[in-house]
């Protein structure tokens, strides 16, 4: 089955700096890659997603890149703000199922 | 505009007891999923369903059962609760026909403790 690895497990940045989270996947048939943000005690919420026919997608301060050849994708957050502090999960989709990474705890310090 | 609704929000069970976690969605989604999230970890798929009457195992199905008699409801049953099943359980759904290429919508979760 699909295996998704996510790095780093924790990330601390100063407000205004950029944050990058990286994921790799194993199944070349995976064709959909969402990113979820989860605040403490809350449900995961989709923040951005990318499909396998696209190399990059941007939404305001958030961008995702996909390298199908290398089987990795990354989340980029620019101009980080304290409200960006949360756990971020990447995922890869094969057929009907999502496989999640283990999460990155992002802390944005003042 | 309820989306995905899970009940109960919290529950404490004794070892060996059974219970059903309820999940309902009002978006007419065909695909529904159950995940568990252990502290500090990612989400692991327990069971999923691609439509009424159809269910399939995910990564960690042992100790659980599901049914899907209607499009709206996808209950998860624990028959003999064990401490290893202490976790937060999330239900999610996909739009009709979207399959894997559509975002999953999550419920607020059920926090289950087994003592």
Image (cartoon, helix red, strand yellow):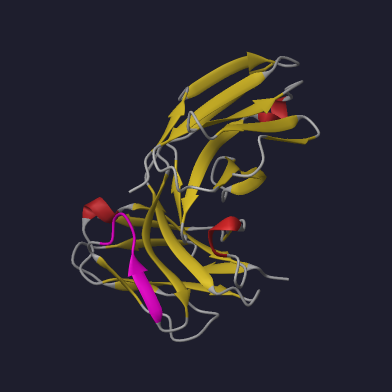
Whether B55 is among the magenta residues is: yes
In the rendered view, tell whether residue A45 sits above or below residue B2: above
Q: Quadrant of residue B30?
A: bottom right
Between B102 and B84, the one lying in front of the other is: B102
The single residue placed furthest to the right in the displayed view is: A60
Segment tinted magenta in the rendering: B54-61
Residue A39 position, x and y percent, is 59, 40
| Drawn side of residue A6 relative to residue B56, left or right | right
Labels in figure, total: 0
* Residue at x 54% of width, y 46% of height: A41
Q: Position of residue B41 (x, y in %)?
A: 40, 39
Confirm whether the magenta stretch covers residue B51.
no
At a point 46% along the width and 59% down the height, the residue shown is: A95
Relative vertical location of residue A46 with respect to residue A57 in this rendering, above or below: below
> Which residue is at the front of the view, B47 or A51?
A51
Q: Is residue B3 above or below residue B112?
A: below
Q: Is residue A101 left or right of residue B103?
A: left
Q: Residue at x 26, y 72 (%)?
A: B18
- Residue A77 spot, x, y in % from top left: 69, 26
Residues B6 and A90: in front is A90
Q: Is residue B67 left or right of residue A6?
A: left
- In front: A30, or B106? A30
């Amino acid at each position: 089955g699909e295996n998704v690895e996510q790095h780093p497990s924790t990330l601390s940045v100063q407000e205004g700096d950029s944050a990058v989270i990286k994921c790799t996947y194993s199944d070349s048939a995976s064709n959909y890659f969402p990113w979820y943000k989860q605040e403490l005690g809350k449900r995961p919420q989709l923040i951005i997603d990318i499909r396998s026919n696209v190399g990059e997608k941007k939404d305001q301060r958030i961008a995702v890149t996909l390298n199908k050849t290398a089987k990795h994708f990354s989340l980029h957050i620019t101009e980080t703000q304290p409200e960006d502090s949360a756990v971020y999960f990447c995922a890869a989709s094969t057929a009907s199922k999502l496989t999640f990474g283990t999460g990155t705890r992002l802390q944005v310090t003042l | 505009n309820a989306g995905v609704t899970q009940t109960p929000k919290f529950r404490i069970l004794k070892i060996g007891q059974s219970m059903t976690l309820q999940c309902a969605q009002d978006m007419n989604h065909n695909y529904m999923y159950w995940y568990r999230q252990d502290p500090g970890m990612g989400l692991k798929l327990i069971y999923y369903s691609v439509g009424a009457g159809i269910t399939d195992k995910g990564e960690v199905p042992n100790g659980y059962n599901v049914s899907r008699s209607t499009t709206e409801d996808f209950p998860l049953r624990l028959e003999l609760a064990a401490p290893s099943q202490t976790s937060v359980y999330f239900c999610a759904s996909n739009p009709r026909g979207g399959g894997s290429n559509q975002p999953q919508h999550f419920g607020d979760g059920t926090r289950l403790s087994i003592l």
